[in-house]
Amino acid sequence: MSFLELAILFVFGTAVGSFLNVIIHRYCPSFFIFSRKIIGGRSHCPHCGGILRWFELVPLISFFIQGGRCRRCRARLSWQYPLVELLSGLIFVVVPFYFLGPISPISPISPISPISPIGPIGLMGLVLVIAWVLVFLTWLLIFFIDLRWFIIPNELNAAIAVLGVFITAGLALGQDFISPFSDSFLRYYALIFSPWPGQVIINHFLGALAGGAVFGLIFFLGRGRAMGLGDVKLAIVSGLAFGWPDIGLAIILSFLLGGAVAAVLLAAGMRCLRDKIPFGPIFVVAAAAIVFWGEKIIAGYFQLFSLPLG
């Protein structure tokens, strides 16, 4: 992919991020997330209610030109606005670049990608890349909505479920071109943990089952206090998108990150033991880490047990 193509994707991604900010800011649990009350109407200042003009809506640029304040009432605006726009722009650049690599549309897909054995990029490759971009955008919405409301909308979990079906179907249709470990971000380490290497549909069904079993057990034993039902659904649908054993590593990493975050917040006096900590954002960070560094995480773990010779 050329620099111009990446630049265009980034600009388009920031514009999408501006739309995501609208959803995050206006979301209310009592409304359907894509209802007209949330996504309809013109953009306005959250403090004075003034309607924003086009030059106040340029992603990233408007926020910094205005010094992070409303042009009318001079109230400070949340850093969430440029952060979501930046992250959305990076998703549109990093995810396609990671899957496709620095190639032209007629070149073979980069060998670093889990879908690389499919061969020259075609409709199947585009479907998989677009599906993963949409998964990341949905994770981004879940991150900020759960952080604010302590809830994961069912609509977003349903969206990941649909995307998970597309990902599973896309990989299954390329079954003849996929080696036993290419349906995993853990690469060949997946052969160690998967009882059905190369069986795309089985592994993705098992991923959904594993995610639901682990988080569902925690929800049941904690009677809904240790983990919310939305987290259980998120683990199920993410497991469908990931497959097994990737979802297993994502769960383990999310628990480790969750423990670290809780320890830091408690040590800093920002939370006490009875306070709730939204787990959705932590799981999203862990899941994203598996996509990009799953193989390296597993390799690093095994290196802890390797002994020097001589």
Image (cartoon, rainbow, N blue to C red):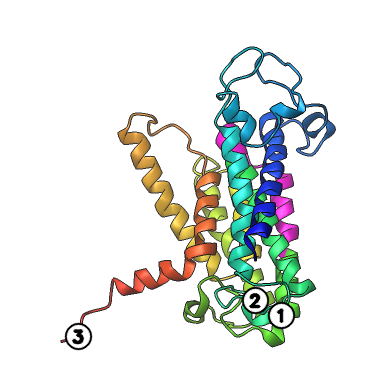
What residue is rendered at 76% in x and 20% in y?
A: 51
The single residue placed furthest to the left in the displayed view is: 310
Q: Is residue 155 magenta?
A: yes
Q: The residue tagged with tag 3: helix, strand or loop? A: loop
Q: The residue tagged with tag 2: helix, strand or loop? A: loop
* Cα distance between the residues tagged 2 and 1: 6 Å
The reply to whether discs 2 and 1 touch (Cβ–Cβ < 8 Å) is: yes
Of the numbered discs 3 and 1, the one sitting upstream in the chain is: 1
Mark 1 lies on residue = 120
Give whichever of 90, 135 is nearer the camera: 90
* Cα distance between the residues tagged 3 and 1: 42 Å
Of the numbered discs 2 and 1, the one sitting upstream in the chain is: 2
What residue is rendered at 57% in x and 33% in y?
A: 80
Q: Position of residue 123 (x, y in %)?
A: 79, 72
* Cα distance between the residues tagged 2 and 3: 38 Å
Residue 309 badge: 3
Q: Position of residue 267 (x, y in %)?
A: 30, 35
Of the numbered discs 2 and 3, the one sitting upstream in the chain is: 2
Judged left or right of residue 12, residue 66 is left
Looking at the picture, which amino acid does disc 1 mark?
Pro
Q: Residues within 10 Å of mark 2 (few under 14, many from 20)?
A: many
What residue is rendered at 39% in x and 73% in y?
A: 299
Q: Residues within 10 Å of mark 3 (few under 14, many from 20)?
A: few
Mark 2 lies on residue = 109
The chief SS type of the magenta part is: helix
Residue segment shown in magenta: 144-164
Q: Answer whether residue 128 is visible to the viewer in this image.
A: yes
